[in-house]
Amino acid sequence: MERWIAGLRRSLKGKFQIMEDKNKSYEELVAELEKLVVGIEDPNKSLSEVSKDVERAVALLALCRAKLRESEEQVKNTLEHI
């Protein structure tokens, strides 16, 4: 039961983090990604820390791609109305 509750907490924490991340600008997301890459390349980091950083980087990449698609769609719509 305790493991289930701990897993639920992690899941909820991750979902709230993603909601907060959606409010960040593309530039803010990229800056965080750059910091993560530096950390991932640090040979003194433990494997579990690197694993968490990679997981976070994947989530940020997905948000960056979504923001880029959204911007592309806005530009496309704007050009269609010229």
Image (cartoon, rainbow, N blue to C red):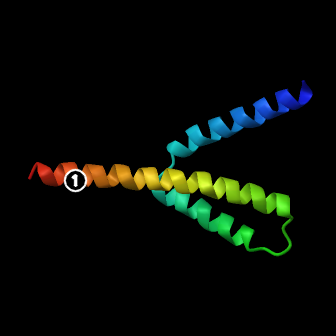
Front residue of 45 and 3: 3
Residue 21: image location, x then y, percent:
56, 45
Side (left or right) of 36 relative to 28: right
Which residue is pictured at 81% across the width and 59% down the height? 49
Task: Determine which residue is flagged by label 1.
Answer: 76
Whether 32 is drawn above or below 66: the answer is below
Q: Quadrant of the N terminus?
A: top right
Residue 69: image location, x then y, percent:
37, 53
Residue 43: image location, x then y, percent:
82, 75
Q: Classify residue 57 by image quadrant.
A: bottom right
> How many C-alpha atoms fall within 10 Å of the one at disc 1: few (<14), some, or many (≥20)?
few
Side (left or right) of 33 relative to 79: right
Q: Amino acid at mark 1?
A: Lys
Residue 56: image location, x then y, percent:
66, 53
All told, the count of numbered labels is 1
Say what secondary structure mark 1 lies in: helix
